[in-house]
Amino acid sequence: MTKSETEHSTPDIIKIAVVGPESTGKSTMSAFLAEHYHTVWVPEYARGYCEKLTEPPTWQDEINMFHGQLALEAAILPKANKLLICDTTFITVKIWSEEIFGKAPQEVIDELPKHLYDLYLLLDIDLPWQDDPLRDFPHMREHFMDIWTKELNALNANYITISGTGEDRYAKAVEAIDSYLNQNLRN
């Protein structure tokens, strides 16, 4: 049984996670990839959740976002056509919780090694910062890029860093996914 078959409720679906620091184009990239591969994508649950908050997120909010991301992914997974594109993952809950509260919820830490993706596309910070009311750290992009790299390495995740701008960035993401698919179809 492959990793994909043991970790997915739909064994023939390959899960691609588009991750990275704030303002790296994750949502735009996810929508592009879903259209390119004629499939669906899972939006970032935390964005919609945080848009409704009137105060900064609490510890319980972080736990709610963790569960919400898992539930949203589970709901969209059956609609996927061979690939499921995920606009970030609940690793963001771990990263933000550690940054804001000094630690992450234990249930998030426990679930991380059990909920892996087949390929992670780590989007580089080489795009210009785009202001957004939900973005907090324009001056800490390098810091968060380092954290993302460490988190993916700690999971022994299969990831590739995607850099560049415009069509070049999209082409690199497609090339990474196509390479992954070609390697795994041969095996």
Image (cartoon, rainbow, N blue to C red):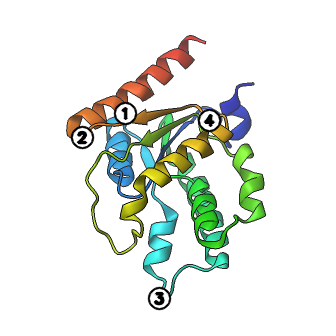
Q: Secondary structure at mark 3?
A: loop
Q: Residue at x 74, y 45 (%)?
A: 114
From the image, state whether disc 1 or disc 2 is nearer to you: 2
Q: Where 167 sits versus 115, above or below?
A: above
The amino acid sitting under disc 2 is Thr
Crowd tier of the residue under label 2, counting other residues whose Cα lies within 10 Å: few below 14, some 14–19, many 20 or above: some
Q: Which residue is mark 2?
A: 165
**Which label's residue is closer to the chain start, 4 or 3?**
3
**Which label's residue is closer to the chain start, 1 or 2?**
2
The amino acid sitting under disc 1 is Ala
Q: Which residue is mark 1?
A: 173
**Mark carried by residue 54:** 3
Q: Where 179 sits versus 136, above or below?
A: above
**Mark carried by residue 157:** 4
Q: Where is residue 126, by image quadrant?
A: top left
**Which label's residue is closer to the chain start, 1 or 3?**
3
**Which label's residue is closer to the chain start, 2 or 3?**
3
Measure how far apart labels 1 and 2 are at the Cα level: 11 Å
Q: Position of residue 153 (x, y in %)?
A: 62, 37
* Residue 49 in view: yes
* Residue found at the very far left of the displayed protein: 166
* Residue 87 in view: no
- The answer to the question of whether label 1 and label 4 lie on touching residues, with beta carbons closer than 8 A, is no
Measure how far apart labels 1 and 4 are at the Cα level: 16 Å
From the image, state whether disc 1 or disc 4 is nearer to you: 4
Q: Residue at x 71, y 59 (%)?
A: 108
Q: Secondary structure at mark 4?
A: loop
Could you say which is closer to the camera, residue 36 or residue 89?
Answer: 89
- The answer to the question of whether label 2 and label 3 lie on touching residues, with beta carbons closer than 8 A, is no
